[in-house]
Image: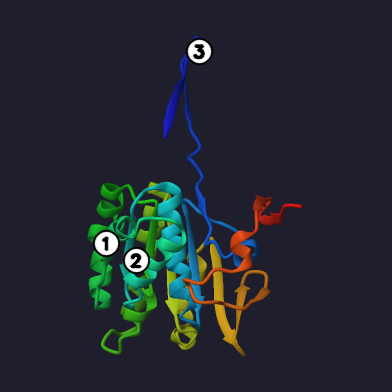
Amino acid sequence: MRAVLKTKTPIEVELLPEVRSVFSSLKPIDNFIGPFQSSEIAFMDSASKFLYDFTAMLCVQAIKRFDREIVFLDGGNSVNPFVLSNLAKRFGMDRKYVLKNVNISRPFTAYQMATLIDERLEEEVKDKGASMLVVSCLPYLFLDEDVERAESYKLMERCVNTIREITKEYGTISLITNYKLSNLHQRAKLRELLYGCADKNVRFEFGRKILRVTLPENGERFDYLPVPHNQTTLDDFTEVVYWEGRYRPIG
């Protein structure tokens, strides 16, 4: 965006884009990983289906905060309308309104996913004025044995580049996710591509009923005891302030 300063000699200047951020509402995790921000891509790699609930929380919070639609490409059949409805109720929102504002497309092959991203994604984000773009379980379809490894890499690379361009152009808060860490263990190039494209990388792992959250860039870890998505905890009633990248309790 550009503007002209009204001086004796008009000067055209580049305006900084509005920076928007969203949190999940799980304050211990939010405090650890920080906000998900506009014009940035976050890659979430998970060994736990907690990833699905966490993504849904971010979606509902984004609708509540920005009152704008979400474009959701679901490559792993990960969206559960009942979870979205329950979260809407938990956050004091109208269920139908939330469901209406999550625009879901479900490709079933790597080629369908690539076509959606190449040919329709930008138009969809622009037309909806989307605040958030979610590409769920992106690697899953590209691991099909019917797709050669070299071709799957090229297709995914093309998808990632397009997502990056759309994210910057339209200022979306963009999420790319992968369920099952083992999906990428034998595909080092795909793993490097996904981790390399993101501004924020987050990994979820389970161990003895404890969820371990890791920030791979610096190796920091945080252990969290998850509860069902529709269950409140004491953290929900704690007044907090976001300050210098961390939540700070008041008092």
* 173 up-or-down from 148: above or below: above
Q: Position of residue 244 (x, y in %)?
A: 69, 50
Calculate the distance from the C-alpha at mark 2 to the C-alpha at mark 1. Answer: 7 Å
> Dot 1, how many residues are within 10 Å of its Cα: few (below 14), some (14-19), or many (20+)?
some
SS at mark 3 in the image:
loop
Displayed quadrant of residue 165:
bottom left
Residue receiving disc 3? 7
What residue type is disc 2 on? Cys
Mark with earlier residue (2, 3): 3
One can see residue 18 in this view: yes
Quadrant position of residue 221: bottom right
| Badge 3 amino acid | Thr
**Is residue 165 in view from this perspective?**
no
Residue assigned mark 1: 118
Earlier residue among tags 1 and 3 = 3
Identify the residue at horizontal 76%, vertical 52% (top origin): 251
Q: Establish if 106 lies above or below 184.
A: above
User: Which residue sits at x=32%, y=70%?
Assistant: 81
Measured as percent of width and height from the top left, residue 29 is found at 61, 67
Pointer 2: what residue? Answer: 159
